[in-house]
Image (spheres, rainbow, N blue to C red):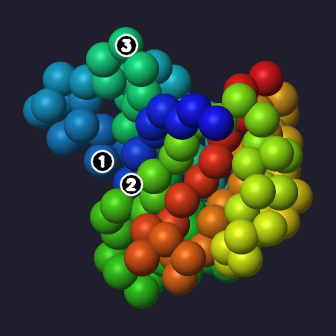
């Protein structure tokens, strides 16, 4: 099974404020900003190179997982996302090896991308997301 980095997610208190560094000072191009109601976040997508991107994630509700993370840490690196060809097979393989998963089954975004998270206890402290593109 092949993997490649899809994105690196950074939690910020406010997407527009964070863009003053990532877009304006660093010079990354802002591809788009989207609101994800299910996860309670706004996300800014900033491509890096030919593959991958930085995602700036800000909570929009006080009870979202990202809001809880922000209140504990003050923001920063949230997760690393690896792209896979077959997320169901990847999750089954991880389950068979006793890996602790946050999502035993993939979730599906509105654009058809399937995703699931692996618990940081299983990875040595890094929240890992798996993505299967639509």
Mark 1, residues whose alpha carbon is within 10 Å: few (<14), some, or many (≥20)? Answer: some
* Residues at marks 1 and 2, CA–CA distance in whole angstroms: 10 Å
Residue wearing tag 1: 18
Label 3 vs 2, first from the N-terminus:
2
In the image shown, does 81 or 124 lie closer to the viewer? 124
Q: Is residue 95 above or below residue 41?
A: below
Extreme residue in the left direction: 25
Given contact means CB atoms under 8 Å apart, are the residues at marks 1 and 2 in contact?
A: yes
Q: What distance separates the C-alpha of mark 3 from that of mark 2?
A: 20 Å
Q: Position of residue 74 (x, y in %)?
A: 33, 76
Marks 1 & 3, CB-CB < 8 Å contact: no
Can you see residue 13? no
**Tag 2 residue:** 10
Name the secondary structure under disc 2: strand
Kind of element beneath mark 3: loop
Front in this rendered view, residue 2 or 22 = 2
Judging by the rendered image, the residue that carries numbered circle 3 is: 50
Instruction: Tell me what residue is drawn at x 19 percent, y 41 percent.
Output: 21
Task: State which mark lies toward you, 3 or 2.
Answer: 3
Q: Is mark 1 on a helix, strand or loop?
A: helix
Residue 20, compared with residue 77, is above or below; it is: above
From the image, state whether disc 1 or disc 3 is nearer to you: 3
Q: Which residue occupies the foreground of this view, 25 or 119?
A: 119
> Are there few (<14), some (14-19), or many (20+) residues within 10 Å of tag 3?
few
Distance of label 1 from label 3 (alpha carbons)? 23 Å
Q: Disc 1 or 2, which lies upstream in sequence? A: 2
Residue shown at the point (45%, 52%) measured from the top left: 80
């Amino acid at each position: 099974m092949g993997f490649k980095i899809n994105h690196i997610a950074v939690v910020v208190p406010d997407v527009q404020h964070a863009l003053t560094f990532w877009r304006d000072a660093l010079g990354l191009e802002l591809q788009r900003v989207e609101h994800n109601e299910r996860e309670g976040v706004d996300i800014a997508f900033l491509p890096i190179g030919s593959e991958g991107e930085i995602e700036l994630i800000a909570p929009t509700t006080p009870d979202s997982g990202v809001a809880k993370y922000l209140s504990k840490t003050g923001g920063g690196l949230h997760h690393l996302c690896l792209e896979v060809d077959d997320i169901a097979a990847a999750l089954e393989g991880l389950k068979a090896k006793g890996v602790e998963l946050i999502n035993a089954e993939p979730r599906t975004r509105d654009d058809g991308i399937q995703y699931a998270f692996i618990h940081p206890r299983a990875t040595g402290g890094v929240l890992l997301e798996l993505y299967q593109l639509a």
